[in-house]
Amino acid sequence: MRKTGTIVLSTLLAVSVSSLGWLSPNAQAATSTKLPKQMEEKIAKLAKNKVSKYIDTKSSKPVDVIVQMNQQPVGEVVKNSKQLKSSPAKDYQAQMKEALNQAEKKLTKVNSKVKVKQRFDTVFSGFAVSIPANQIHKLASMPEVKAVYPALKYKALSTGGSTVGAPEVWKLKDAQGLPVDGRGIKVAVIDTGIDSKHPDLKNNYIGGYDVVDRDNDPQDEQGHGTHVAGIIAANGDIKGVAPEASILAYRVLGKQGGTTSDILTGIEMAVRDGADVMNLSLGANANYPDDPLVSALNHAAKIGVSVTVANGNSGGDAWTVGVPATADKVISVGASTLEKEFPKFEVVGTGTSFDGAQLTKMKFPSNSQFEIVDVGFGSPLDYKKVNVKGKYVLVQQGAAKQDIYVSNAHKAGATGVLLYVKGQEQEALQNIEASLDNKIPAVQLAAKDAIDLKASLKAGKAIASLKEYKPYEFMAEFSSRGPVHETWAVKPDVVAPGVGIKSTVPGEEKYAEYDGTSMAAPQVAGAAALLRQMHPDWTPEDVKASLSNTAKTLTDITGKSYDVMTQGAGRIDIPKAIQATTLVTPNNFTFGLVKPNSGEAKLEKKLTIKNTSGTSKTYTSRVEMATNTGIQVQAPNQVEVSANGQEDLTVKITVDSSLPRDVYSGYLYLTDGKEEQKVPFTFSIDPASYNRVNYLGVSDLIFSPNGDGKEESTTLSYYVPTVAKHLNFYLRNLDDESKVSLIHQEENVGSGWHGMKWTGNAVDKKAVPEGIYEMQAVASDDEVESATAALVLVDKTAPVITANLNEEASKIDLKIEDFLMQYNYFFKMFGLAQDDLVKVEYILEGTNDRVRVPLNEEKMEIEIKPEWLESGKTSMTILATDDAGNQMKTKVNLKK
């Protein structure tokens, strides 16, 4: 079994070509007449431009790709998804079916090994195809083909409703006088399936499909999809955001993730089944603006489906958003924490105050005053030196667990604990949860506040009082950040709580708490269902704008706002969104990229203000930026919009391009005196954080450059978004990190996809020894450097077979040793079983049949059957072949 080390994602570089009558069933087949050389070159160039720059087309091995055809999908010829069942749409679909039949015949003639696995026609036009990689350009040269993308593997992104204001909205009435709780709205969950018999979901589930197993029962074997569905529409012991919404479930992810083809199929089925809202809590860890799923989801939104997508769980750094959250028409959703309350204290008579993170479920008593005593590390011996009864103790945390310190304080008679860690910053406190069950309250302080308290104690008695419990909502550390590569688009659009979210799961436990943007996205899907019920005339763009325009800006514990690429517009506020009478589109915008030191840059963008109320409004604008130095932003001071009307507004920006290389962001605010809408925006001066190389993949995770002619090389694939002055490839041995080899160098590497065959040698021509390595591509110019990495394993030796005849027990005792087996723990992360690392077989004398023997490091044996000896078969050959193609065989006699 061969395993690729990473997954390649695609960006479309397609040129527009006419369909040359491919919709016509009578279109003539291509002739065998040889084309003029000039025409061959033109077609070859065209084919190259149509193939994703992330596909390695040099290999003869079969690869799965998604082929996009020039013909528009059915979704393009209707105004909304409800028209998909109309006669014109059905006529067009029938015409398309015949055209796809003709195209499929041509596809399979490209090469005898081409296999069409799936076809798409609703929001994407094309096929899922298996084809030898070196035949892809030939396939792309067909005039019917618009683009060829790699087929990817996607995974679920996990590591109720009251958190975003839903219960307040349930009290409202829609146009029919019914509660706004999602009734009448269909929400499609594209995920791992659903437990349709769960007591909190069974009344909401109305149908779906298992795309993985190809049946009508999308039973959830993992729990992720059931959890997502519960967040949207659970209606039992817990309530989802839209508890009366109907759930459609499509199982597109199995235990090993899911493919582009299966997810596309799920999307198309959901659209055809009349979904009003669609949620995808899945993604791939790569950041590109174009992809088959991106195209399909943008089409779905265009015909009236509100789509929410998890932004990804690779956060902390910029550029970590992953497809398909990069689609511009979807609502991409980052994750925030649930509201946390931090106790705020004041030291009496000093005017100083401090706050901290609650550690215990038990809170400090309100309006309380208490004396503080410093007890050092809070050991039982420390408490013998001082009277702490009825007092709060200041304790420096060492190696013990937090509850030990609190327990020691309680036993000594203290009534509260102020714990701190030396050197710990205030920002670290926001990741702490109040989880301890101790019988006295405890709080974690920042080290600086603890030092200030110690100074107060040295000056005399310190009396502190609890002033309040202040609520905070923070961004989750794992939540992926924008912008989108190449387009510089703002992502996420909004955020919602995604930490410690309780929802439905299959099995006896029924409920569980999960973390992830997977848990944040369905809250926004539920919100979209409520908005669609309340405002049936709103488009997906309107829904997206209302949620974004009215979102709450989140700040860290120091009061500093998170930047736009971290939180988008902020945490959704459903009551404000549903009652908004002003919508500003697009919901965010970017001025794009400014070249460094290129003088003064002047840019502008147009927005539309829509007044949905019955009275005219005058809006006043203002702009806020984190820095105004060298940046001037201009917008009209006032804009008047008539009742139920709309007006355009142009925002202009002047930028000093000598500013530090970075992503700059701000907010445009519009207010009519009652409501305030905000629109995030950004521009970038070729940021130092922008990866000069943002993808590195190896075609074979394991290879064997030992001269035996088997698996002698692996192909490196790498993508350079912008010209790289220097590009170096290093190899670091993970068993001895001091050993680093330079294996390849390039200069002035152009933007785009690149590939090279690596045969296991360093630049000094020396062969790299066996080992497990991190391969790192490092791109740099005169000012900045960036890197990306992949794993590769070099295995040059064959397995060792030890076989002993145990004639008395009628068996052969067997032991297999191989270089790969020591990394079994590592390969499990890639879903590779031990049997995949080394294949053990035997061939009985006089036969050609190979019989597989399960690999076991502890004990292996082959039973000697009496009929073998009776028929004169007295020996066998045992073979052991590792995943790198290295093989050892030995002959064993069955009797002495």
Image (tube, rainbow, N blue to C red):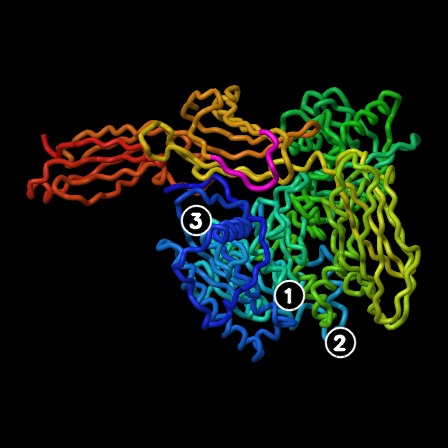
Is 24 placed left or right of 390 in the picture?
Answer: left
**Disc 2/disc 1 C-alpha distance (Å):** 21 Å
Q: Which residue is mark 2?
A: 175
Q: Residue shown at 90%/66% (left/top)?
A: 617
Q: Is residue 715 above or below residue 45?
A: above
Residue, far bottom: 87
| Residue 765 appears in the picture as rendered | yes
Task: Magenta stretch: give its range.
Answer: 747-756
Pick the residue in front: 575 or 846.
846
First in residue order: circle 3 vs circle 2: 3
Q: Is residue 789 above or below residue 146?
A: above
Is 792 placed left or right of 782 in the picture?
Answer: left
**Disc 3/disc 1 C-alpha distance (Å):** 32 Å
- The percent coordinates of residue 233 (x first, y second) are 62, 63
Q: Which residue is mark 3?
A: 63
The residue tagged with tag 3: helix, strand or loop?
strand
